[in-house]
Amino acid sequence: MVSLIPPATRNRVGNRAVFVPTRTATGMYESGAFVADHVEPLREGQVQPNGVDLTVDAVYEQTAPGRIERGDKRVGDRRELRPVNGDGDGAGEYRLDPGAYVVQYGETLRVPDGHVGFVYPRSSLLRNSCMLNTAVWDAGYEGRGEGLLQVGHALELERGARVAQFVLSTAEHDGRYDGDYQGERLSAADGDSDDDGGDDDEVGSDAA
């Protein structure tokens, strides 16, 4: 697929590199076709007029306290939930009681220079008394990220279902993302596409 990434002007302010889109205005959302060039893998029906739908790859429940400090952070241990009614091909569904869960997406996202990314919940979640919360996705980020799924009423969620939409907006930015989550789960993208959703393992991270 031909890349549709527009050029970005790289200026310097002091010792910092500032990327400025060459378009006449910032804060303009890109088309779904543009966003699709920065998301993989894609299935039929994921590309929307103004973005790309993201799917559920795994669901976790936090089991231990995390910690956020002024200069560091630690993600608390998590338990990966096992989908039920699976047939061994990675399918199945999660039966979620009201509460908070971490959803990991099945797609690798890349935020190009001159842009910022946002992830919004699909309306089907909202209509089922659920909400998906995410943070800003900085320019330069690449990885398979996650979001906070808040379930207000019991929900049956099929693995691989579309739960969010990823959009890109033009934006100036000071440098590029190089934080702890850069490249997250990219190795898993090559090796775990055929697993069955986990075995209720405990997962934790001191670096994230």
Image: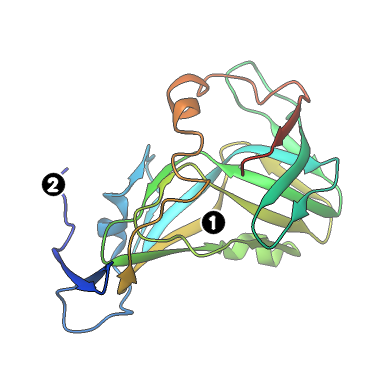
The residue sitting at the top extreme is 88
- The percent position of residue 46, horizontal first and vertical second, equals 41, 49
Alpha-carbon distance for marks 2 and 1?
A: 25 Å
The residue sitting at the bottom extreme is 25
Describe residue 129's horizontal placement relative to residue 31 as left or right.
Answer: right
- The percent position of residue 193, horizontal first and vertical second, equals 50, 24
Describe residue 5's horizontal placement relative to residue 99 as left or right.
Answer: left
Q: Of residues 24 and 127, which is closer to you in this image? A: 24
Q: What residue is shown at x 48% (from left), y 41% (from top)?
A: 144
Q: Residues within 10 Å of mark 2 (few under 14, many from 20)?
A: few
Relative height, residue 31 to residue 43 (above, below)? below
What secondary structure is found at the residue carrying circle 1?
A: strand
Residue position marked by numbered label 1 in the rendering: 164
Relative height, residue 129 to residue 196 (above, below)? below
Relative height, residue 128 to residue 62 (above, below)? below
Quadrant assignment, res 122: bottom right
Locate the N terminus by quadrant.
Answer: top left
